[in-house]
Amino acid sequence: DAIITVTDIHKVYPNGVHALKNVSQTIKEGEVVVVVGPSGSGKSTFLRTLNQLETINTGEIVVDGISLTTPGDVNKLREEVGMVFQSFNLFPHLSVLDNICLAPMKVRGISRSDAEDRGVELLVKVGLSDKAGSFPPQLSGGQQQRVAIARALAMQPKIMLFDEPTSALDPEMVGEVLEVMKQLARSGMTMVVVTHEMGFAREVADRVIFMESGELLEDSDPEHFFDEP
Ligand code: ADP
Ligand code: ADP
Protein backbone atom coordinates (compact mmCIF):
# COMPACT_ATOMS: atom_id res chain seq x y z
CA ASP A 1 0.00 0.00 0.00
CA ALA A 2 1.14 3.55 -0.72
CA ILE A 3 2.33 5.47 2.33
CA ILE A 4 3.59 8.52 0.39
CA THR A 5 1.82 9.90 -2.68
CA VAL A 6 3.34 12.88 -4.46
CA THR A 7 1.35 14.29 -7.37
CA ASP A 8 2.63 16.87 -9.86
CA ILE A 9 4.46 19.04 -7.36
CA HIS A 10 6.34 22.23 -8.15
CA LYS A 11 8.68 24.12 -5.86
CA VAL A 12 9.93 27.57 -6.74
CA TYR A 13 12.15 29.26 -4.16
CA PRO A 14 11.63 32.97 -3.48
CA ASN A 15 14.82 33.68 -5.46
CA GLY A 16 13.17 32.17 -8.55
CA VAL A 17 14.99 28.81 -8.58
CA HIS A 18 12.57 26.20 -9.91
CA ALA A 19 13.80 23.36 -7.71
CA LEU A 20 11.07 20.79 -8.38
CA LYS A 21 9.29 20.49 -11.72
CA ASN A 22 6.20 18.37 -11.96
CA VAL A 23 7.47 15.62 -9.70
CA SER A 24 5.21 12.65 -9.00
CA GLN A 25 6.05 9.60 -6.98
CA THR A 26 4.32 6.85 -5.05
CA ILE A 27 6.18 5.12 -2.25
CA LYS A 28 4.86 1.95 -0.68
CA GLU A 29 4.97 0.95 2.93
CA GLY A 30 8.28 -0.75 3.67
CA GLU A 31 9.92 0.43 0.49
CA VAL A 32 13.48 1.76 0.43
CA VAL A 33 13.88 4.45 -2.22
CA VAL A 34 17.27 5.97 -2.99
CA VAL A 35 17.39 9.37 -4.67
CA VAL A 36 20.43 10.16 -6.80
CA GLY A 37 21.41 12.94 -9.18
CA PRO A 38 23.88 15.80 -9.56
CA SER A 39 24.33 18.50 -6.96
CA GLY A 40 21.57 21.11 -7.22
CA SER A 41 19.14 18.77 -8.98
CA GLY A 42 16.50 19.06 -6.22
CA LYS A 43 17.10 15.90 -4.19
CA SER A 44 17.27 17.64 -0.84
CA THR A 45 14.32 19.88 -1.68
CA PHE A 46 12.25 16.85 -2.63
CA LEU A 47 13.10 15.11 0.63
CA ARG A 48 12.32 18.17 2.70
CA THR A 49 8.89 18.61 1.12
CA LEU A 50 7.96 15.19 2.53
CA ASN A 51 8.02 16.45 6.11
CA GLN A 52 7.11 20.03 5.29
CA LEU A 53 10.50 21.52 5.97
CA GLU A 54 9.76 23.02 2.54
CA THR A 55 6.32 23.98 1.31
CA ILE A 56 5.32 23.34 -2.29
CA ASN A 57 3.78 25.80 -4.73
CA THR A 58 1.42 23.46 -6.55
CA GLY A 59 0.57 19.79 -6.53
CA GLU A 60 -0.27 17.50 -3.68
CA ILE A 61 1.56 15.36 -1.14
CA VAL A 62 -0.18 12.82 1.06
CA VAL A 63 1.87 11.12 3.78
CA ASP A 64 0.19 8.29 5.67
CA GLY A 65 -3.21 9.82 4.97
CA ILE A 66 -2.16 13.33 5.98
CA SER A 67 -2.49 15.84 3.14
CA LEU A 68 0.34 18.33 3.30
CA THR A 69 -1.58 20.76 1.15
CA THR A 70 -4.11 21.50 3.82
CA PRO A 71 -2.49 23.65 6.43
CA GLY A 72 -2.61 21.73 9.63
CA ASP A 73 -0.90 19.30 11.75
CA VAL A 74 2.81 19.64 11.05
CA ASN A 75 3.59 18.17 14.46
CA LYS A 76 1.63 15.01 13.82
CA LEU A 77 3.41 14.65 10.50
CA ARG A 78 6.85 15.19 12.02
CA GLU A 79 6.14 12.47 14.59
CA GLU A 80 5.51 10.03 11.76
CA VAL A 81 8.41 11.12 9.61
CA GLY A 82 11.89 11.00 11.15
CA MET A 83 14.77 12.75 9.46
CA VAL A 84 18.54 12.42 9.53
CA PHE A 85 20.71 15.19 8.09
CA GLN A 86 24.24 15.42 6.85
CA SER A 87 25.16 17.34 10.00
CA PHE A 88 24.12 15.47 13.10
CA ASN A 89 22.60 18.44 14.96
CA LEU A 90 22.89 16.87 18.40
CA PHE A 91 22.74 19.04 21.51
CA PRO A 92 26.37 19.12 22.67
CA HIS A 93 25.57 19.86 26.30
CA LEU A 94 23.14 16.94 26.65
CA SER A 95 24.22 13.36 27.17
CA VAL A 96 23.65 10.88 24.35
CA LEU A 97 20.71 9.36 26.22
CA ASP A 98 19.17 12.77 26.94
CA ASN A 99 19.50 13.72 23.26
CA ILE A 100 17.46 10.63 22.40
CA CYS A 101 14.87 11.08 25.16
CA LEU A 102 14.20 14.78 24.78
CA ALA A 103 11.62 14.75 21.99
CA PRO A 104 9.65 11.71 23.18
CA MET A 105 9.32 13.35 26.60
CA LYS A 106 8.53 16.88 25.36
CA VAL A 107 6.47 16.14 22.28
CA ARG A 108 4.85 12.87 23.21
CA GLY A 109 4.65 13.27 26.98
CA ILE A 110 6.36 9.96 27.65
CA SER A 111 7.76 9.59 31.17
CA ARG A 112 11.49 9.91 31.67
CA SER A 113 11.88 6.29 32.74
CA ASP A 114 9.96 4.95 29.74
CA ALA A 115 11.86 7.24 27.39
CA GLU A 116 15.16 6.11 28.90
CA ASP A 117 14.24 2.43 28.65
CA ARG A 118 13.47 2.87 24.99
CA GLY A 119 16.55 5.05 24.49
CA VAL A 120 18.80 2.35 25.91
CA GLU A 121 17.23 -0.22 23.56
CA LEU A 122 17.86 2.07 20.60
CA LEU A 123 21.47 2.57 21.64
CA VAL A 124 21.91 -1.20 21.61
CA LYS A 125 20.41 -1.27 18.11
CA VAL A 126 22.87 1.29 16.78
CA GLY A 127 25.80 -0.35 18.59
CA LEU A 128 26.39 2.37 21.18
CA SER A 129 25.13 0.84 24.41
CA ASP A 130 28.28 1.99 26.21
CA LYS A 131 27.84 5.64 25.21
CA ALA A 132 24.58 6.58 26.98
CA GLY A 133 26.35 8.93 29.39
CA SER A 134 28.80 10.39 26.89
CA PHE A 135 28.40 13.82 25.34
CA PRO A 136 28.32 14.30 21.56
CA PRO A 137 31.65 16.15 21.33
CA GLN A 138 33.32 13.06 22.84
CA LEU A 139 32.08 10.87 20.00
CA SER A 140 33.35 10.31 16.47
CA GLY A 141 31.27 11.54 13.54
CA GLY A 142 30.08 8.04 12.79
CA GLN A 143 29.00 7.55 16.39
CA GLN A 144 27.23 10.92 16.43
CA GLN A 145 25.33 10.06 13.28
CA ARG A 146 24.24 6.75 14.81
CA VAL A 147 22.97 8.70 17.83
CA ALA A 148 21.08 10.98 15.44
CA ILE A 149 19.45 7.91 13.87
CA ALA A 150 18.51 6.58 17.32
CA ARG A 151 17.08 9.97 18.22
CA ALA A 152 14.87 9.99 15.13
CA LEU A 153 13.74 6.43 15.83
CA ALA A 154 12.81 7.33 19.40
CA MET A 155 9.70 9.05 18.06
CA GLN A 156 8.64 5.73 16.55
CA PRO A 157 8.27 7.13 13.04
CA LYS A 158 6.65 5.21 10.20
CA ILE A 159 8.95 6.78 7.65
CA MET A 160 12.63 7.76 7.81
CA LEU A 161 14.21 10.37 5.54
CA PHE A 162 18.00 10.52 5.15
CA ASP A 163 19.67 13.52 3.49
CA GLU A 164 23.24 12.55 2.61
CA PRO A 165 23.74 10.92 6.00
CA THR A 166 27.34 9.89 5.35
CA SER A 167 28.61 12.84 3.31
CA ALA A 168 30.13 14.67 6.29
CA LEU A 169 31.92 11.59 7.64
CA ASP A 170 35.49 10.47 7.34
CA PRO A 171 35.57 7.51 4.93
CA GLU A 172 36.37 4.96 7.64
CA MET A 173 33.11 5.84 9.44
CA VAL A 174 30.75 5.56 6.51
CA GLY A 175 30.37 1.79 6.82
CA GLU A 176 29.11 1.77 10.41
CA VAL A 177 26.35 4.26 9.57
CA LEU A 178 25.32 2.43 6.41
CA GLU A 179 25.21 -0.81 8.41
CA VAL A 180 22.68 0.70 10.83
CA MET A 181 20.63 1.94 7.86
CA LYS A 182 20.72 -1.51 6.26
CA GLN A 183 19.44 -3.07 9.47
CA LEU A 184 16.64 -0.55 9.56
CA ALA A 185 15.74 -1.30 5.96
CA ARG A 186 15.64 -5.02 6.71
CA SER A 187 13.33 -4.35 9.66
CA GLY A 188 10.72 -3.08 7.18
CA MET A 189 11.06 0.68 7.70
CA THR A 190 9.92 2.88 4.82
CA MET A 191 12.99 4.90 3.86
CA VAL A 192 13.79 7.67 1.40
CA VAL A 193 17.53 8.19 1.15
CA VAL A 194 19.52 10.83 -0.70
CA THR A 195 23.03 9.46 -1.00
CA HIS A 196 26.02 9.09 -3.27
CA GLU A 197 26.74 5.65 -1.81
CA MET A 198 26.00 3.51 -4.85
CA GLY A 199 26.93 0.31 -3.02
CA PHE A 200 24.17 0.99 -0.53
CA ALA A 201 21.72 1.76 -3.34
CA ARG A 202 22.57 -1.42 -5.20
CA GLU A 203 22.36 -3.59 -2.12
CA VAL A 204 19.44 -2.10 -0.23
CA ALA A 205 17.23 0.00 -2.50
CA ASP A 206 13.97 -1.34 -3.82
CA ARG A 207 13.98 1.56 -6.25
CA VAL A 208 16.37 4.24 -7.42
CA ILE A 209 15.07 7.64 -8.49
CA PHE A 210 17.25 9.83 -10.67
CA MET A 211 16.76 13.60 -10.56
CA GLU A 212 18.17 16.26 -12.83
CA SER A 213 17.40 20.00 -12.94
CA GLY A 214 14.38 19.58 -10.70
CA GLU A 215 12.87 16.79 -12.74
CA LEU A 216 12.45 13.18 -11.79
CA LEU A 217 13.89 11.51 -14.85
CA GLU A 218 14.20 7.87 -14.08
CA ASP A 219 12.65 5.46 -11.70
CA SER A 220 13.77 1.87 -11.77
CA ASP A 221 14.82 -1.07 -9.71
CA PRO A 222 18.53 -1.01 -8.83
CA GLU A 223 19.47 -3.84 -11.21
CA HIS A 224 18.21 -1.91 -14.21
CA PHE A 225 19.46 1.42 -12.96
CA PHE A 226 23.03 0.25 -12.58
CA ASP A 227 23.06 -1.99 -15.63
CA GLU A 228 22.37 0.84 -18.03
CA PRO A 229 25.40 2.18 -19.91
P1 ADP B 1 20.44 18.77 -4.28
O1 ADP B 1 19.95 18.24 -2.97
O2 ADP B 1 20.17 17.85 -5.44
O3 ADP B 1 21.86 19.22 -4.23
P2 ADP B 1 18.80 21.05 -3.66
O4 ADP B 1 17.42 20.56 -3.46
O5 ADP B 1 19.62 21.35 -2.45
O6 ADP B 1 19.57 20.06 -4.64
O7 ADP B 1 18.76 22.38 -4.54
C1 ADP B 1 18.00 22.46 -5.75
C2 ADP B 1 18.12 23.86 -6.28
O8 ADP B 1 17.44 24.75 -5.40
C3 ADP B 1 19.54 24.39 -6.37
O9 ADP B 1 19.60 25.22 -7.48
C4 ADP B 1 19.71 25.17 -5.07
O10 ADP B 1 20.66 26.19 -5.20
C5 ADP B 1 18.32 25.72 -4.88
N1 ADP B 1 17.99 25.91 -3.46
C6 ADP B 1 18.05 24.99 -2.47
N2 ADP B 1 17.63 25.50 -1.31
C7 ADP B 1 17.31 26.78 -1.57
C8 ADP B 1 16.81 27.85 -0.77
N3 ADP B 1 16.55 27.69 0.52
N4 ADP B 1 16.58 29.01 -1.37
C9 ADP B 1 16.82 29.18 -2.66
N5 ADP B 1 17.28 28.24 -3.48
C10 ADP B 1 17.53 27.03 -2.95
P1 ADP C 1 22.18 20.44 0.63
O1 ADP C 1 22.39 19.99 -0.79
O2 ADP C 1 22.64 19.45 1.65
O3 ADP C 1 20.83 21.01 0.88
P2 ADP C 1 23.29 23.03 0.10
O4 ADP C 1 24.70 23.49 0.26
O5 ADP C 1 22.66 22.92 -1.24
O6 ADP C 1 23.21 21.65 0.86
O7 ADP C 1 22.34 23.97 0.99
C1 ADP C 1 22.64 24.30 2.30
C2 ADP C 1 21.54 25.22 2.81
O8 ADP C 1 21.49 26.41 2.00
C3 ADP C 1 20.16 24.59 2.69
O9 ADP C 1 19.41 24.95 3.84
C4 ADP C 1 19.57 25.18 1.45
O10 ADP C 1 18.16 25.28 1.57
C5 ADP C 1 20.22 26.55 1.38
N1 ADP C 1 20.45 26.97 -0.01
C6 ADP C 1 20.97 26.24 -1.01
N2 ADP C 1 21.03 26.95 -2.15
C7 ADP C 1 20.52 28.16 -1.85
C8 ADP C 1 20.29 29.34 -2.60
N3 ADP C 1 20.59 29.43 -3.92
N4 ADP C 1 19.77 30.40 -1.96
C9 ADP C 1 19.48 30.33 -0.67
N5 ADP C 1 19.65 29.23 0.09
C10 ADP C 1 20.17 28.18 -0.49
Image (tube, rainbow, N blue to C red):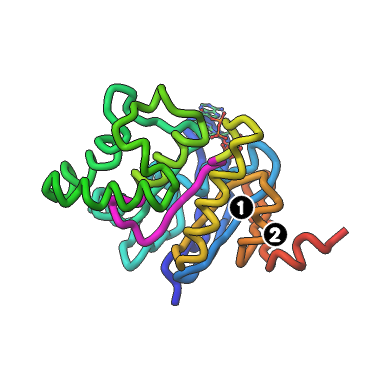
In this picture, residue 142 sits left or right of residue 154 = right
Q: Are marks 2 and 1 in contact (CB under 8 Å)?
A: no
Residue 205 drawn at (x, y percent): 61, 62
Residue 72 visible here: no
Residue 185 percent across, percent down from the top left: 51, 61
Q: Residues within 10 Å of mark 2 (few under 14, many from 20)?
A: some
Assess whether residue 118 is covered by the magenta stretch. Answer: no
Which residue occupies 45% across, 70% down? 29
Q: Which residue is mark 1?
A: 35
Q: Residue at x 36, y 31 (%)?
A: 90
| Left or right placement of residue 125 versus residue 218 in this view | left
Nearer to us: label 2 or label 1: 2
| Disc 2 within 8 angstroms of ligand 1 (CB) | no
Q: Tag 1: residue type?
A: Val
**The residue stretch that appears in magenta:** 153-165
Residue 229 versus residue 180: which sits nearer the camera?
A: 180
In this view, the residue in front, 132 or 65, is 132
Q: Is residue 195 among what the camera can see?
A: yes
Q: Position of residue 157 (x, y in %)?
A: 33, 57
Q: Establish if 109 lies above or below 87.
A: below
Determine which residue is flagged by label 2. 202
Q: Residue furthest front?
A: 130
